[in-house]
Image (cartoon, grey):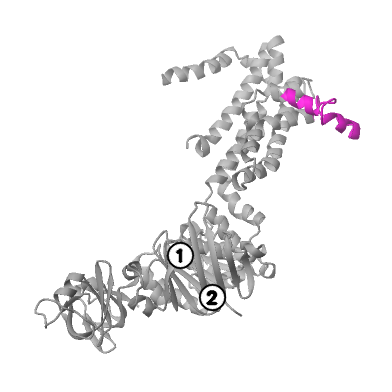
Amino acid sequence: MSGLVADLRATRPTGFHVELQIEIQPGTTVALLGPNGAGKSTIVEVLAGLLAIDEGSVRLGGRVFDSPLDDVFVPPENRQVGVVFQDYLLFPNMTVLENVAFGLRAKTSSKDSAPAIAASWLEKLGIGDLARQKAGELSGGQAQRVALARALSPDPDLLLLDEPMAALDATTRVQVRRELADALEAFAGPRLLITHDPTEAFLLADQIYVMEGGSISQRGSAEEIRLRPRTPYVADLAGANLFRGVARDGLIDVGGHKLHAANSSVSGEVLATLHPRAISVHREHPEGSPRNVWETELTRIEHYGDRVRLLTGSPLVMTAEVTPSAVEALELSTGITVWVSFKATEIGLEEA
Amino acid sequence: MASVAVVFFLIPLIGLLARAPWSDLGSLLSSEVVVDALVLSLVASIAAVVLSALLGVPMAWVLARVAFRGRAFVRGLVLLPLVLPPIVGGAALLFALGRRGVVGEPLYEATGLVLPFSIWGVIIAVTFVSMPFLIITVEAALRNVDQRYEGAAASLGASRWTVFRRVTLPMIGPSLLAGFVLTWARAIGEFGATVAFAGNLQGTTQTLPLAVFVSLESDRDTAIAISLLLVAVSLTVLIGLRDRWLSR
């Protein structure tokens, strides 16, 4: 089975134009990363069949969903695409169980067993006790799980997640993200995650497509996007330094290298973020308050208009951002040895 | 000025209540003329609501959801009875569906059915005048529904009909109810179209408002009694609607 193959141009009723070329293999997750208004949700509508494309085609597993040239358009009810919508869109007048059984009841094969299958999905996601509650009365985290159960229960061929965690507060987000990672792992078809949060994309996706102003500006692995952003926008959006490590008493072990973090309340597996602007670059050993200081090699210098991104080598590959005048004053060039420093307070910590 | 308005609306009511033949009310309202008219009015108005539901709700859905050429024209056409003097509507129905009408003549020759001056005529006239209230209410409600819910339902494999029945209908429920009540209220008070198309035959096509009109000439006490009955019915409907619709 080949996965999702789409090459399309589409226009919203408002006149907003999007174009996308994408391939998602079964069993892999692609993140569509971009700011609000980039056209990400339009892509969800197009793939789900809620908006017809102008040109190109959308295929899933060899089945043609939409191809204006061949006069083919499969309506949403015949596509079997599971969608977790932004704001979840649970039917407020129905119970949780009725919401999850809704898609099952629409399929002739599972009509009679719908409530039983729906209940088993609720159990699987640990929300079996919510079955009789009205969907309008749920908390964000509960609604997210119900929306996931509703999308997955009819056994779809493609899974679309539109900002599945945007409505959650920070404390539930970590927990829900872990569950989501498991759910994605368990789903055998192609998966598309729509998000504006780079961390979410890096943690959950195998490949990232960055969308700006209705089209894709860059695609690649998380590593490629992070270390080689191709536009200033991508650099801003996704160019933060990101380290996976183990935290203990304010020290983070990242592959043997220890970072000082001001936040000592988090421990265990963590994700540390550090903005490139927070890193200072020196030609000599700096004296001062920053607790994180080390010597490294300057491996690359890239100019983005009024900013310069510096890539540093071992012990920890990082991106630092400085001004062109700083590059000139310090006579920076690739291959030279520099000192980098940043304060412990600049490190953002999140449980992984 | 507001108090002047209140007085303006209160005075006719006081006029009715002051002249009401309270002691004879029971016997007046149980006379054959009144009972016949009441039964006919109830049957015709309920039939108008049912017909409006069957025809008007799909019409409202098409107007709200389907972009087609001439939509503005169709909307104007179905809402025309709202602004048209009812008696003009009734006359138009007579020319169209009467025994010598454009549609009525072939209908009579084929089936022997004569619509005017029968209970069917009353139902048609009343429906013609009242259905626009349901269409306009339901169309507005459909436009206010967050259509993303319908998209979500379709993505789960639900057919258009299932989406409408299980998702859209519950969302427009309160407006639908308000539309039914408005339609029914308009239908029970209908006079002009009925008198023009169905005539004023006691026991066959004479509804409550027609009975009031007739008895104003001959028997004032009966006219006042029926009027009070209609006021009571209307007030009940308005109070029932208050929370759902009017106070919004």
Q: Tell me which chain the residue with mark 1 is part of.
A: A
Q: Residue furthest top?
A: B218
Name the amino acid type tagged 1.
Answer: Ser
Instruction: Find the residue positioned furthest to the bottom.
Output: A256
Q: Is residue B215 left or right of residue A340?
A: right
Tell how many labels: 2
The amino acid on which the numbered mark 2 sits, given as a three-letter code, is Pro
Query: Which segment did they paint magenta?
Result: B90-119
Figure check: A24 above or below B62? below
Horizontal relation, residue B144 to residue B77: left or right: left
- Whether residue B170 is visible to the viewer of this picture, yes or no, is yes
- Which image quadrant: the C terminus of chain A? bottom left
Element marked by disc 2: loop
**Residue tagged 1:** A215
Q: State which quadrant residue A249 falls in.
A: bottom left
Q: Nearer the viewer, mark 1 or mark 2?
A: 1
The quarter holding residue A168 reads bottom left
